[in-house]
Image (spheres, rainbow, N blue to C red):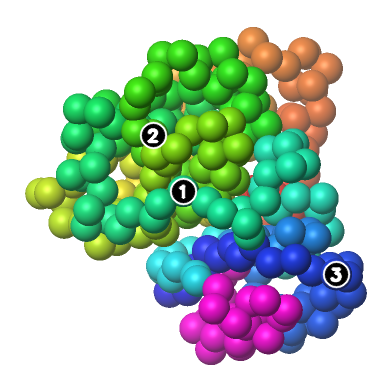
Amino acid sequence: MFTVCALYHFSRFENHEALRPPLLELCLKEGITGTLLLAPEGINGTIAGTRKGIDAVIAHIQSLPGCANFEWKLSTAADKPFPRMKVKIKKEIVTLGQPNVDPTAHVGNYVTPQDWNELIQSPDVVTIDTRNDYEVAIGTFQGAVDPETASFREFPAWWEENKDRFHNKRVAMFCTGGIRCEKSTNFLMSQGVEDVYHLKGGILKYLEEVPQEDSTWDGECFVFDGRVSVGPELKEGPHVLCHACRRPILPEDLSRPEYEAGVSCHHCVDASSERDKTRFRERQKQMLLARERGEQHIIGLD
């Protein structure tokens, strides 16, 4: 079994680029795979490896400026979730595109998984899913509003167009691990929304801690690693990934006429040109040849 660690922390790094070499070196030394993002506003990512290796990386991150009390979430995977290790330099660790948003200044009220159901079932509360449309499609909380955004960057425009719908409402927001809500709640507060709440630890913490018989979650939760989706108690879900569009699909979708391994699925068959499909077929061919030689052809999951 592999230990999977999802983490993020907002902290002002004066020289975030200088943090990359020692962090990457440690991950490679410990056999860790996955992706970590470094930006002036902090660190974000998901990694996997042995528990000993994960603990070493956690200790290193705790030593970074302002990260002594950062939080992380652990789960397990039967198969290797990532093909390689990457530490990337970014402008933002989660892209909202709003330069004045600062989660280190103030965010919404944290709500524990144990108190979440009571909050979102209150008649004066609107619950908003801040994730992308393809994530929401396979699972969300009962009664949650789906903004139908293709990326987090679209959220501010969606809010501006829809904010009148939620006049005199308390706003509860949630996302996979909590990071998007750090920014979205700060953004709403800057727009004059006073009563803003978000699920502490995100969906993953809720699925881990709330018994299934008490859960208000329907479906599976999309995760950005080889597991594709998880359910109650963070058990691996049934979904697989279309390597053409990176959307989650079910095993029965593999028998649909639109599906061609590595080339298309029913979500994306009309979204790519024949030229693209030819390129995808060549990529798929090279991957199969590499597998026959006992090699790993990296196509990426992030």
* For residue 24, side relative to residue 167 (left or right): right
Q: Which residue is mark 1?
A: 108
Q: Amino acid at mark 3?
A: Glu
Q: Is residue 191 magenta?
A: no
The reply to whether discs 3 and 1 touch (Cβ–Cβ < 8 Å) is no
Q: Which residue is mark 3?
A: 14
Q: Amino acid at mark 2?
A: Val
Residue 246 is labelled as: none
Near mark 3 (Cα within 10 A), the count class, few <14, some 14-19 or many ≥20, is few
- The residues tagged by marks 3 and 2 sit, at their Cα atoms, a distance apart of 33 Å
Q: Residue at x 82, y 82 (%)?
A: 22
Please report the bounds of the magenta region as a residue range.
Answer: 47-70
The location of residue 290, given as percent across then percent down, is 74, 54
Q: Residue at x 53, y 64 (%)?
A: 6
- The residues tagged by marks 1 and 2 sit, at their Cα atoms, a distance apart of 9 Å
Q: Which residue is mark 2?
A: 171
Q: Nearer the viewer, residue 108 or 279?
A: 108
Q: Amino acid at mark 1?
A: Gly
The reply to whether discs 1 and 2 touch (Cβ–Cβ < 8 Å) is yes
* For residue 146, side relative to residue 157 (left or right): left
Q: Nearer the viewer, residue 193 or 80?
A: 193
Q: Earlier in the sequence, mark 3 or mark 2?
A: 3
